[in-house]
């Protein structure tokens, strides 16, 4: 595994629905991984090559919880061990042939795979995306491939001022640029919170709130966990009202590096209004398709090409200017470096009351009044 | 020439019919070669670049047994020497300009080119493909480009157990997997013989034998010569009958590396039944197109991509498991290494009676009874 | 900047009409350059990436002579200095953010950009292409992208004997091959003159001279300035007549390397006959499209591929034969090396009377009679 990837870490491998009893594969952090569900419906993740001739196993067959290599028919069990060699007179397995098994956890409609030392895999370290399965909400979701180094996409997501330029007329507004930004560390988790009170909402938000047309409070609270798992708590509410009275949405932005030049971007929008209305789902899908696929993707891919022309892979390979608005990206990059140095993304203890405290304090006149509860 | 290629060796450059009085070129072992026939119909092979500005000569003209460079008009004779410089006041040739001439031999409907020291080129070293010109047989033939390192294709051909997986329902059968395999060296030639008695024949064979439907003896005898010239003696006959009473076919599989990532695969099927029936020819062409183009090619190219992802070019660059069924590929790879170390594929003396002996002994109860005649 | 490019040099960046008040970019000698005109119509050239996140600025906006970055909205003035940071509470510019400004000169319908030390930029060093704006002539012009190292195209243009092979039946003739060639240095400028008297003109020339059908004098006088700025003084006139009585044309051939594998080829044909006739303009456009796009481009790109296969980028990376007709390319390559060694293309003093002297002397029996005027 390249120095660019955090080894001992959970990665989002797939949406739960992408993996069935068929054979599915995806390259994650430079390794080709085979995903499938066994007869009991449990997900499995194995290295996607036969150790005999390196044939890709996803071209093979899944026979009664055994993977058959498409090239010469060696069979492997759910634990990756060879269970049958058809060329042996008695079909005895080739003991030396073994697929790497990766810890895998199905949680919150996602399949999380651990790419490092299996003994260190602790599902408690998987960030919370429980909004995905909250029955009071609905979600649309998908995965986009971006031809860019994943930290460039993290930068994009942790500095949402870009919305006013890249998503001008859709998700951008004067209010976002003029908002107050706060970067808070909570163990290994980082929050980048932008509070944008009493401005006309971005056009897509205003429209989604029934063409409201009047000033609103707009919040964009991004939570980051290493290596690049983000959840945006975002919404609009009439100025001075509670979040519950407004339109409250969670934006999932989980980045899984395929390699240094390509990233799998798992996205979702989980929303609390119109959850039974297929038109609302369509609207959110269209917004994401337009904003992420049609605006962010070309911008980030053009940025990547320019970085390549300038002789780098990542922005840190080049001389660059860092602005105050980069404090979020900067903090996350620093944390990732720190975790890569200690070779693990195992999270540190978190402050249980912080989340609520952050919401409350938005409307305080003075942020210094905020009382961050002790861990 | 890269360390990956055997320099002092004959390579198949083209099917005889591919080369006419037009200018034809093909990249062989990293070198671009110009092929054409002179007025007498004799084939010529020269380096395909003008030593003046490196223009590709196949874009030029063949004028009365002289090649004219398409860029500035220098002319070269059949021996590669410059015979005319149109820019010299008297048209005197530029003596220092000279194309490399490669020994070329037309034999058994193939054009063989020697890529090494011309003094060592001995046409007696060209393997026997005389079945191609056997009047009692008919053949279909062609050339496929595979995006793979050539030794991976050799591996494929010297371990035909893959037929039961890659060509399942076409050329594969239980009988092949359960067959007896024998690997025999004869000088620098290697035989990998698979004898599969008294099983239902693979579906394509059964159909070609008139939808026979009953157990047959099936033989697959592959002959290998360095660097990758193979001939498969293959067929089916009713259990216990002689080969002559069955359907007897020769499969030509000659691999010529273009470079380390691409291989020219010259194939032919030479058969003894229905030789005047165009439907039979079509059937064989269809079978090859389906099995080699539609099944082997995608498998081997997927294998190559996986090897590349794992950081190698060839399977030997990676940690891999070798099975007993790899004894053929292993023996050939070893022989090729040995020949590359001594920088020549000049064959050692062969055992004249071995071929017949091998056929006879198939039906012996005990292979150890086989008497291999002395050289 | 790579050792392959002459740093302190003017490069043709664009035809003047390519650059408007929109944002235009082109990669020149490895650097992506942003071109646009300000409100006063003056051209500007700046580095095309925001020093913040390396986003390409040509995707941004030009607002009242300020460039706005498409990603986060930083604004830059005509001199490349940041003039506005929308994320600063008072919009104060980020002083450390600065685009590189390149000296740019609009001259003879071309935009010339200086890629080196701005203090050394002297517009007097830009070669003379005043024919472009000569009111007594008309011109057609364009730009072709060639997938080749630029010096290979210089070689093509400084040895016009290739016309008789590559452009056979169009721009080639026996007369060109048999012509007299003279290579003359004048400071850092090189002339490669080919005088081809009293032969049937090349077919395209004969046709353009009203299907003349009789022998003519044909001259091809190429002027070269570093790194690859060429002007061809070319025409046909009835044998023994003056140039003025014939068809007199200037061919512009200016090569700007994009990188080591791609070249921008700025071409023009400036002519003195039928200057108001749109059919004549069409004829010249068609001729260039056919000869440069359809004949030179495939030849040079095929040559480049062959050089790559042989392990080089440029012909000088390989063992090659140089002919007498290469004296022009050779002289230019030597001069370019000399200028790259002293890191500047600042031209040396020129001989003012040389140009006229060259024309006069064509018809002298003995070229040695030519009197080259003193500088």
Image: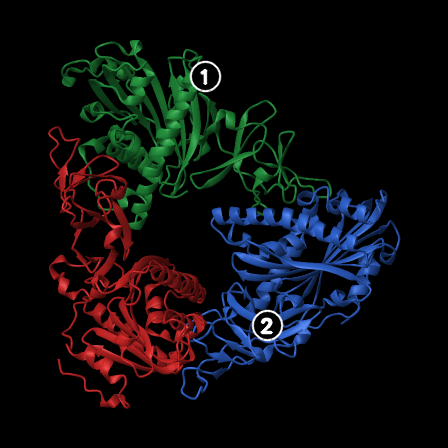
Chain colours: A red, B green, C blue
Q: Secondary structure at mark 2?
A: strand
Q: Are marks 1 and 2 on the same chain?
A: no
Name the residue nearer the viewer: A9 or C365.
A9
Asked if residue A63 shows in the view, the reply is yes
Q: Secondary structure at mark 1?
A: helix
Please name the residue that numbered disc 2 is placed on.
C36
Q: Which mark is residue B278?
A: 1
Position of residue A24 relative to residue B130, above or below, is below
Rendered position, C303 above or below C261: above
**Position in image of residue C191 (x %, y %):** 71, 60
User: In the depicted view, which residue is nearer to us: A183 or B230?
Assistant: A183
Return the mark for residue C234.
none
Q: Quadrant of the N terminus of chain A?
A: bottom left
Position of the C terminus of chain A, as image quadrant, is bottom left
Relative side of A284 to A14, left or right: right
**From mark 1 to mark 2, how far is it between C-alphas?**
68 Å
Graded by Cα atoms within 10 Å as few (under 14), some (14 to 19) or many (20 or more), the crowding at tag 2 reads many
On the image, the x and y values in percent for residue C149 come to 55, 56
Q: Residue at x 29, y 18 (%)?
A: B206
Chain letter of the residue beneath label 2 in the structure image: C
Q: Is residue B336 left or right of residue C51?
A: left
- Which one is nearer the viewer's eye here, A111 or B138? A111
Kindly indicate the quadrant of the structure image that contains residue B225: top left
Question: Where's residue A278, x and y in %?
Answer: 33, 58
Q: Is residue C12 left or right of residue C365?
A: left
Residue at point 18% right, 50% down? A43
Measured as percent of width and height from the top left, residue A225 is found at 23, 69
Q: Closer to the camera, C355 or C112?
A: C112
Displayed quadrant of residue A127 = bottom left
- Classify A95 as above or below A224: above
Categorize mark 1 by other alpha carbons within 10 Å: few (<14), some (14-19), many (20+). few
């Amino acid at each position: 595994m390249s120095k660019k990837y955090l080894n001992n870490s959970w990665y989002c491998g797939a949406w739960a629905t992408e993996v069935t009893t068929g054979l599915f594969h995806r390259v994650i952090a430079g390794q080709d991984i085979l995903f499938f569900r066994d007869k009991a419906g449990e997900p499995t993740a194995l290295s996607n090559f036969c150790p005999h001739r390196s044939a890709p196993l996803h071209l093979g067959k899944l026979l009664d919880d055994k993977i058959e290599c498409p090239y010469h028919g060696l069979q492997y069990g759910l634990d990756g061990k060879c269970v049958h060699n058809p060329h042996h007179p008695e079909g005895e397995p080739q003991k030396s042939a073994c697929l790497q098994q990766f810890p895998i956890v199905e949680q919150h409609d996602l399949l999380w795979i651990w790419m490092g030392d299996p003994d260190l895999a602790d599902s408690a370290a998987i960030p919370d995306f429980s909004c995905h399965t909250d029955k009071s909400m609905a979600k649309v979701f998908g995965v986009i491939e971006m031809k860019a180094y994943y930290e460039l996409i993290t930068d994009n997501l942790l500095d949402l001022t870009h919305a006013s330029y890249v998503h001008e007329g859709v998700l951008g507004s004067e209010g976002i640029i003029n908002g107050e930004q706060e970067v808070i560390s909570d163990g290994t988790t980082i929050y980048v919170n932008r509070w944008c009170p009493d401005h006309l909402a971005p056009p897509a938000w205003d429209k989604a709130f029934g063409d409201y047309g009047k000033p609103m409070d707009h919040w964009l609270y991004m939570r980051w966990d290493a290596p690049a798992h983000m959840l945006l708590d975002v919404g609009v509410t009439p100025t001075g009202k509670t979040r519950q009275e407004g339109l409250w949405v969670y934006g999932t932005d989980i980045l899984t590096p395929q390699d240094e030049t390509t990233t799998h971007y798992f996205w979702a929008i989980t929303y609390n209004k119109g959850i039974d209305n297929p038109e609302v789902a369509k609207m959110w899908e269209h917004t994401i398709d337009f904003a992420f696929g049609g605006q962010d993707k070309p911008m980030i891919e053009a940025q990547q090409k320019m970085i390549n022309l300038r002789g780098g892979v990542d922005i840190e390979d080049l001389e660059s200017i860092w602005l105050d608005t980069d404090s979020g990206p900067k903090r996350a990059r620093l944390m990732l470096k720190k975790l890569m140095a200690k070779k693990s993304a195992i999270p540190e203890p978190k402050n249980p009351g912080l989340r609520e405290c952050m919401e409350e304090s938005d409307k305080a006149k003075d942020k210094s009044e905020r009382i961050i509860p002790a861990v």
